[in-house]
Image (cartoon, grey):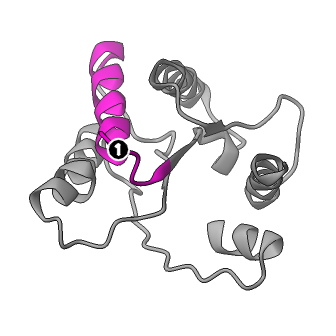
Amino acid sequence: MIQPAINALSPQAQCEIVTWDTAGQSLAQIEAEAKARGWFAFNQNPELPKPTLVVIAVPASAAAPDFERFYRSYTWVLNWSLSFGPAQWDALAVLPEVTQPDLIDEEHERAAWALEVVLGQDIPYLTRPEGKQRGADELLHAWLREQLQP
């Protein structure tokens, strides 16, 4: 979704998108992969090309046994995705209801927990305004347009 949103605002923008399929993974598995791919990896190997933007979109299906473990793992997913020290890249958290508007009961609970973690990290995030039926791509495009306005 990010490539079309960026190109709609800046048609000449050159983007290299690296995706990461998290479908079917637990939150603990996503946390471990975030460590292997994120800030820690760049510190261990400074030759790796650094991203400009990291979009973190943990699916609502990524479960943990309880709130405490969810909070800890989700926090580390975000931490491993952020740049520490001098800012090296930007980050955007995409909350579960953006990409999956029809959450079931336990997914609603996890989405609320995710918002709590993201607010605690004080990073930009994309959520679905209540009652809005726009697609995830439209929400992302609108958010980017809003961020780039002077």
Judge whether residue 56 can be spotted in this image.
Answer: no
Please name whichever residue, 110 or 31, is drawn nearer the observer in this view of the structure: 31
Which contiguous range is marked in magenta? 66-90
Quarter containing the N terminus:
bottom right
Identify whether 26 is placed above or below 45. above
Residue that mark 1 sits on: 86
Q: Quadrant of residue 129?
A: top right
Identify which residue is drawn at 35% across, 47% down.
Answer: 81
Q: Tell me, yes or no, if residue 68 can be seen here.
A: yes
From this view, report whether residue 49 is shown above or below residue 135.
below
Q: Residue at x 49, y 80 (%)?
A: 16
Left or right of 129? Residue 117 is left
Residue 111 highlighted magenta (yes or no): no
Residue 12 coordinates in the image, percent (x, y): 73, 85
Give the residue type at disc 1: Pro
* Residue 18 or residue 130, whichever sits in front: 18
Q: Residue 99 location in percent, x, y?
A: 65, 50
